[in-house]
Amino acid sequence: MSSNMPAKLLLTTLYILLVFLPIHMSPHDVNIDTHSFKSSSSTSGHRSKIGGGGSAKGCNNNNSNSNQLDTNTTPCQKSTTIQAVPAASSPPLVFADQRLEVVYPTVQKFKSTITSDPLGVTKTWVGSDICSYKGFYCDTPPDNSSATALASIDLNGFQLSASTLDGFIDNLPDIALFHANSNNFGGTISPQIAKLSYLYELDVSNNQLSGPFPTAVLGMSTLTFLDLRFNFFSGAVPPQIFTQNLQVLFINNNILTQGLPDNLASTHILLLTLANNKFMGPIPRSLPKALSTLSEVLLLNNQLTGCLPYEIGFLEEATVFDAGNNQLTGPLPLSLSCLEKVEVLNFGGNLLYGMVPEVDADSERGS
């Protein structure tokens, strides 16, 4: 037995080496980065021989060793720096006068509301030279002879469409003349228009404007020309409108109602068109008596009733008097012979009777 002991001891030693040697081979004994094979949730705590001892997740390496990996990039990804390129900015607008700079936002806002521009008018409404915009005209304002201001706008016949003029006209402080005949503007006329100190002509005829008569014009002492024809204004006309400084009042072809006022003694109106509305009641006696300078009176296509007042003959300057298609009754007054300058005299479509007297031509020559 003793002779076999060395052999048995040798076999036992070889068995131990073969069986237990792999168990003691830890990752510390090989040069392999085990982190690259583990998920980010691994908690083995083993450190890699590559990377100078990084953490288990390899995301917060604060070692200043120059051989460390860039932990802010993923494998095969180069670190790049992207710099934002600033957008090209337009040069600031330079205006000829501060007054033009003030109205520029108002004009551009109104431009943005225009839904139809078949003639391409608004294509010219670009830049700081407002005075070159089509339909815009500049002049010297009354309060400053060295300034330049937007003085008038003429959009007649441009066929523009917009839902409203509110916020446009009333925000043009130096405007003296505003014409917008034959467009497609809707809405009402803003009460703020009363604050315009220089406006003397307002023509918004042949549009789609509506609402009550714009009483804001009653506070405008400079207004001499008001044209609201061919719109959809409705309701009563305030009597005060006839005692303003107006020389021209065109309000025909609307839906205006009630009677004509009887306070016309101090009116300055020269051209008065009330036709194609729904005015009711008699023709006021004060109308012809007070308006000795009135040259045209258009009352046709209303619902006027009663007799023709004798005072019609006092309209010495009248060239047109048209009261056709109403409900007037009674005889034609003999005073019609005093209308020496009349060229158009129409009472058709009423219940009047009698002959139209001839005008005494000799009386016109003073013989």
Image (spheres, grey):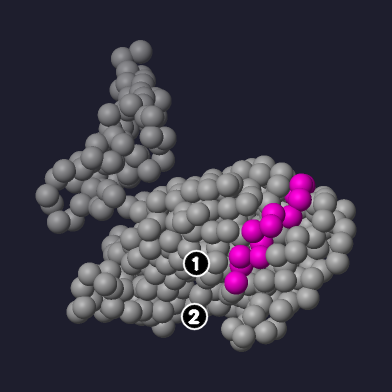
Could you say which disc has been placed on residue 247 in the image? 1
Q: Give the residue pinned by disc 2.
A: 134
Image quarter (top left, top right, bottom left or bottom right) of the C terminus:
bottom right
Q: Is residue 212 magenta?
A: no
Residue 164 left/right relative to 328: left
N-term mark: 1 or 2: 2
- 25 and 86: which one is in front? 86
Image-quadrant location for residue 55 = top left
Residue type pointed to by label 2: Lys
Image-quadrant location for residue 170 = bottom left
Where residue 321 appears, x then y in whole percent?
70, 67
Where residue 215 appears, x then y in whole percent?
49, 47
**Dot 1 crowding, Cα within 10 Å, few <14, some 14–19, many 20+:** some
Q: Residue furthest top?
A: 1
Determine the secondary structure under disc 2: loop
Where residue 53 appears, x then y in whole percent?
20, 41
The number of discs equals 2
Q: Which residue is painted at 66% across and 62% down in the image?
A: 312
Q: Which residues fall within the magenta stretch?
A: 304-316
- 22 and 206: which one is in front? 206
Image quarter (top left, top right, bottom left or bottom right) of the N terminus:
top left
Q: Which residue is painted at 50% across and 54% down in the image?
A: 265
Residue type pointed to by label 1: Gln
- 288 and 183: which one is in front? 288
Q: Is residue 171 above or below residue 360?
A: above
**Dot 2 crowding, Cα within 10 Å, few <14, some 14–19, many 20+:** some
